[in-house]
Amino acid sequence: MPKLETYKKQAKLLVRWHREGNFSIGGRIRQLARYRTLSDREALALKFPLTEAQEIIALEAGCASWAELKASTEADPPTSEQPKTQDTAVASAKPVLFVADVDAAATFYRDQLGFRIDFLHGNPPFYASVSRDGATLHLKLVHEQVFAAGAAEREGLIMAFVDTPNVRDLYAEYLAADAEIVQKLTKQAWGGTDFIVRDPDGNAITFVG
């Protein structure tokens, strides 16, 4: 278990994020039963003293209260530090797509492209994750257009590559679903076969076999 000083720093960081209006802490505040029904905006409008931040940190550490967390850390016997073996392996990558409406984008990936909605973060959502089998895409809300009008189409910008062992079957599935396919199934000179789908926000996703 981390030292008490680490938990104290985490609580102070929560207070700072609340003061700065960081919507990402709304879900953490809703862990307190009395705030369970609040929206992110309502959570940020609360008075949020350090004691409440400590209460949240204690819950996240598996304790019923800050006093219990403090007692458990103080009771932990000191342990000798063991040298850690550095692991430099990279496990996975998750492309982040910019969208104007996170809820609508997640629904598109679910209903037309067969992805599962892993989570919608925020109320209303400003970040989400969708996945299908081993592929995961993150969706981030932006209020202004990121690229100049028409740049993505002119430059042929690809926002994500998705590997699939059955690219022809997937192509047939997306044709039947009336997905916007901007490049038909094509055998490429480098040996792969791919096609490109564009989502409602203009993000081009290449499916490669």
Image: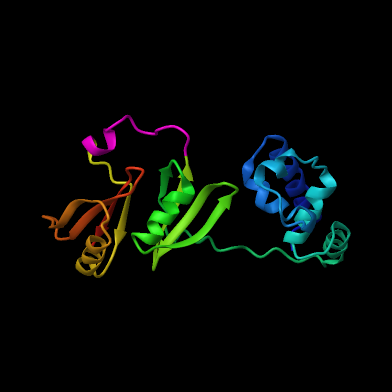
Q: Nearer the viewer, residue 59 or 32?
A: 32
Residue 148 lies in the magenta stretch:
yes
Residue 93, visible in the rendered structure = no
Depicted 89 relative to depicted 35: above or below: below
Quarter-of-image position of residue 79: bottom right
Q: Which stretch did the figure color magenta?
A: 142-154
Residue 99, visible in the rendered structure = yes
Which residue: 69% across, 40% down?
A: 17
Quarter-of-image position of residue 144: top left
Residue 186 in the image, given as x and y percentages of width and height: 13, 57
Quarter-of-image position of residue 115: bottom left
Which residue: 72% across, 36% down?
A: 19
Depicted 81 relative to depicted 104: above or below: below
Q: Is residue 161 left or right of residue 128?
A: left
Main SS, magenta region, reads loop
- The C terminus sits in image quarter: bottom left
Q: In this view, does 71 lie to the left or right of 135?
A: right
Depicted 66 relative to depicted 16: above or below: below
Q: Is residue 22 left or right of residue 114?
A: right
Residue 63 in the image, given as x and y percentages of width and height: 80, 64
Residue 205 in the image, given as x and y percentages of width and height: 30, 52
- The N terminus sits in image quarter: bottom right
Q: Nearer the viewer, residue 108 or 136?
A: 108
Q: In this view, does 136 lie to the left or right of 149?
A: right
